[in-house]
Amino acid sequence: MSIQHPDRRVKRTKEKFREILLSLMEEKSLRDITITEIVKGADFNRGTFYAHYEKKEDLLDEIIEDMFDKMTEAFRKPYLHLSVIDFNEIPSNSII
């Protein structure tokens, strides 16, 4: 079974929405941000936004999920080559 990867255009569109939302969140709270602001900042229309997300919170959830995925990957990377991990031998500063 092959893994489906989104079209490059979809990736670019979603990345632009993420960029704009995070930029707007530097200025004000999520509650005060409108979808109109997001789509205007990204230079897309509302239909494009709704083709990918139901609401702005879904976009934020996707950003958070992506960050957790990246953190998990980063934490696991040093241990990928090991078949057995002795947690008693892991330095405490590696989990800070």
Image (spheres, grey):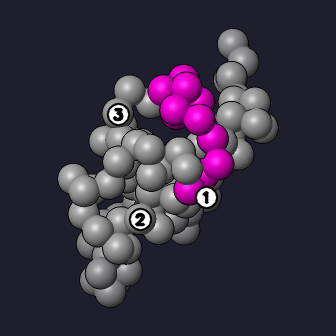
Q: Is residue 39 magenta?
A: no
Q: Nearer the viewer, mark 3 or mark 1?
A: 3
Q: Nearer the viewer, residue 90 or 77?
A: 77
Give the Cα separation between the discs numbered 1 and 2.
Answer: 41 Å
Which residue lies under the disc numbered 2? Answer: 24
Looking at numbered disc 3 in the image, what kind of residue is underneath it? Lys
Query: Where 57 falls versus 52 (above or below)?
Result: below
Residue at image x 52%, y 32%? 46
Q: Amino acid at mark 1?
A: His
Mark 2 residue crowding within 10 angstroms, few (<14) / some (14–19) / many (20+): some
Say if 20 sits above or below 52 in the image. below
**Along the horizontal axis of the image, is 16 left or right of 8?**
left
Q: Which residues are magenta?
A: 41-52
- The amino acid type found where label 2 is placed reads Leu
Q: Is residue 74 visible?
A: yes
Q: Which numbered marker is on residue 55?
A: 3
Cα distance in 3D space between marks 3 and 1: 41 Å
Residue 73's place in the image compared with 49, above or below, is below
The disc, 2 or 3, on the residue closer to the chain's N-terminal end is 2
Q: Quadrant of residue 61?
A: top left
The answer to whether 36 appears left or right of 90 in the picture is right
Pick whichever, 85 or 50, lies toward us: 50
Q: Residues within 10 Å of mark 1 (few under 14, many from 20)?
A: few
**Residue highlighted by disc 1:** 81
Residue at 31% in and 42% down: 57
